[in-house]
Image (spheres, rainbow, N blue to C red):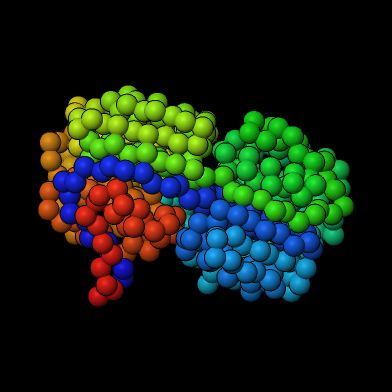
Amino acid sequence: MARIQVSGGRRLSGTVEISGAKNAVLPILMAALLTRRPCRLAGVPYLRDVATTMQLLGQMGVAISVDDRARVSLDAAGLSTDLAPYDLVKTMRASILVLGPLLARHGSARVSLPGGCAIGARPVDLHLKGLAAMGAEINVEGGYIHARAERLHGARVVLDTVTVTGTENILMAATLAAGTTVIENAAQEPEVVDLAECLISMGAQISGHGTNTITVVGRERLEGYDYRVVPDRIETGTFLVAAAMTGGKVRTINTRPNIMDAVLQKLEEAGAELSVGDDSIELDMQGRRPRSVNITTAPYPGFPTDMQAQFTALNAIAEGTGVVRETIFENRFMHVQELQRLGADMRVEGNTVIIRGVERLTGAPLMATDLRASASLLLAGLVAEGETVVDRVYHIDRGYENIEEKFGQLGAAIRRLPVS
Ligand code: EPZ
């Protein structure tokens, strides 16, 4: 398994360029299934999940090519199958996002149930309930979702829980349904907004995206897209937390400050000096140790669950006691026992972790379990004395482009170890 070694104690400084948002790229690539026209997407990050998505779409008969400037061209005119097989879906739950587009464009879909993952059961019941409300016949057997619909029709879908990919599946299906669909309690995440904007560029009639009520008037067909994906707010936040933890000064560029209010507010509470431009955020910790902060995760615009592990790591070495509450997923504390191996003083009580900041951590071998937990282990390794080796970094490669190069450019002593 690939491993990354980091030697702690270096103060990060310099500039890092932010890549396109993983959680916007994935649904937008799937949206190419909605049309027979060619599509082109710019700003695509080089990530395992993007490679998996292109493999999945390629298997379905979508013609895909990537040029040397991270632009992906897709053409789904030759769509040849409606199958999303288990061997791919089990490596990337977001594969469920082919369901809505296949039903809308092709009239049928066979998608493996994603199954759970390290951070929780991750059911897709709300995806299925919404599509059934739009006229899809859905049954689940043999671990697969079998769905059919001559033509989906508009419906009023009230989502019991805010679900990002659930909103995205129903939104994409609604663009080609007969009539109007209203999605209540819709996710407001910037990645949902980016998908909606891309769909609108294809001719979809969508309003209310970015609020909790999205209205879609279905069309007969959609054009292709020529679109650039929104920058990754979670990658941005991860580098800013790394700067705060190491007492450094880091400038993130090609990012989107106006979708990061909750995270930037917590960084200021931790004592960071922020200077924010149109597409840049600079964090200066001026050599100080961060102060502990209290976090409660929530759907956007609340504090993002995908930044919880990173702030848990920050609290591990901060001044004071921080309380972190995870309200989105039932098991998103896998990083805690790994951080404890470095000497962190934290304990989990239900969906809360209480963290008493310590002066220093000591490097140790660690095991990555899920994407954002793995990032928090690297962050802790940046400040732990001595060497920290994080194993199973394929988790990190799912969501961070060239992470060791980017940290290396900022002065970290970090390298990927040859596979043993
Ligand atoms: C998306 O996952 C993101 N992934 C996740 O990012 C992110 O953590 C999550 O949203 C929350 O922001 C992508 O966009 C590809 P949900 P998603 O459906 O859509 C429950 C990362 O690190 N739920 O919003 O799968 C669910 O169990 C990844 O980049 C149902 O009960 O998350 C959870 O408790 C990790 N039934 C809550 O809703 C459903 O049908 C929110 O999940 C769907 C969800």
Instruction: Please state, as top left, top right, bottom left or bottom right, where the N terminus lies in the image.
Output: bottom left
Q: Please tell me which residue is depicted at 84% across the width and 54% down the height of the picture.
A: 221
- Out of 359 and 254, give the one closest to the viewer: 254
| Residue 103 in sight in this render | no
Corner quadrant of residue 308: top left
Instruction: Please state, as top left, top right, bottom left or bottom right, where the C terminus lies in the image.
Output: bottom left
| Residue 402 in sight in this render | yes
Corner quadrant of residue 106: bottom right
Horizontal arrangement in the rendering, residue 328 relative to residue 408 (left or right): right
Give the percent coordinates (x, y) of residue 7.
18, 54
Give the percent coordinates (x, y) of residue 103.
75, 59
Horizontal arrangement in the rendering, residue 229 relative to residue 263 (left or right): right
Horizontal arrangement in the rendering, residue 190 relative to residue 294 (left or right): right
Horizontal arrangement in the rendering, residue 248 relative to residue 232 (left or right): left
Picture mark count: 0
Q: Please tell me which residue is depicted at 45% across the width and 47% down the height of the picture.
A: 18
Give the percent coordinates (x, y) of residue 418.
27, 72
Q: Please tell me which residue is depicted at 81% across the width and 53% down the height of the picture.
A: 222
Instruction: Please say if 334 is above or below 304.
Output: below
- Out of 256 and 36, give the one closest to the viewer: 256
- Out of 284 and 29, give the one closest to the viewer: 284
Q: Please tell me which residue is depicted at 24% across the width and 51% down the height of the picture.
A: 412
Give the percent coordinates (x, y) of residue 306.
43, 43
